[in-house]
Image (cartoon, grey):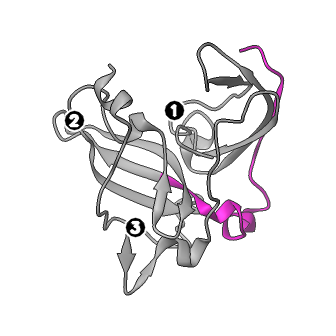
């Protein structure tokens, strides 16, 4: 979109265990038909709810992905809040699908906290984006991008500057 932005690893390293950054994590999943593994980013928006992009849940035409694993605050192979893989369900919007956890009495958000959500209000605002892009540090460290967001295309779509690629989808 030609928007100006700044980009950096989240720092210091301990920031991955401090709110709100600790609510963001790396999401792993598998396509059950091709048996291919993928990664995205996600964030806690409620005590037991991880929000990510629709294309990280469903292939957009015929099937949901499987074997979801979420690791909040992941940095260089360290998972301070563990590995969460006991999913009850994954959902996406009908428009996406048709258009082309608990452990020991606790949920992930009991450890990390959560961000909540609101939308669509990105246009004309400063935006901070967090995620695990594979083009930066091989997706092993969380990155942060700050940019102005502007309306783009149809209703509720915005564009902003970023150097993050695959793996960062779904991050807040």
Q: Circle 3 sits on which residue?
A: 84
Q: Circle 2 sits on which residue?
A: 63
Q: Circle 1 sits on which residue?
A: 166
Is residue 58 rendered to the left or right of residue 77? left
* 35 inside magenta stretch: no
Give coordinates of residue 87: x percent, y percent.
31, 63
Query: Helix, strand, or loop for circle 3?
Result: loop
Query: Which residue lies at the image location 79% right of the left edge and 61% below the top edge?
Result: 12
Query: Which residue lies at the image location 25% right of the left edge and 25% below the top edge?
Result: 61
Query: Which residue lies at the image location 71% right of the left edge and 20% below the top edge?
Result: 151
**Of 149 and 5, which appears nearest the observer?**
149
Q: Of callouts 2 and 1, which one flags the residue occurring earlier in the amino acid sequence? A: 2
Q: Residue furthest left?
A: 33
Give coordinates of residue 71: x percent, y percent.
48, 62
* 16 inside magenta stretch: yes
Query: Helix, strand, or loop for circle 1?
Result: loop
161 w.r.t. 12: above or below: above
Q: Of callouts 3 and 1, which one flags the residue occurring earlier in the amino acid sequence? A: 3
């Amino acid at each position: 979109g030609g928007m100006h932005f700044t980009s950096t690893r989240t720092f210091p390293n301990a920031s991955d265990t401090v709110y709100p950054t600790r609510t963001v994590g790396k999401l792993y999943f598998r396509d059950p038909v091709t048996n291919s593994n993928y990664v995205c980013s996600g964030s806690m928006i409620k005590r037991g709810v991880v929000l990510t992009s629709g294309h990280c849940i469903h292939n957009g035409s015929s099937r949901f992905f499987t074997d979801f694993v979420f690791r909040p605050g992941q940095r260089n192979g360290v998972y301070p809040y563990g590995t969460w893989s006991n999913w009850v369900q994954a959902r996406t919007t009908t428009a996406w699908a048709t258009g082309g956890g608990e452990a020991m009495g606790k949920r992930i958000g009991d450890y990390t906290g959560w961000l909540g959500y609101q939308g669509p209000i990105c246009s004309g605002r400063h935006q901070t984006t967090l995620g695990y892009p594979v083009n930066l540090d091989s997706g092993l460290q969380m990155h942060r991008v700050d940019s102005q967001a502007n309306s783009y295309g149809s209703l509720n779509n915005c564009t902003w500057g970023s150097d993050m690629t695959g793996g960062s989808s779904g991050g807040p």
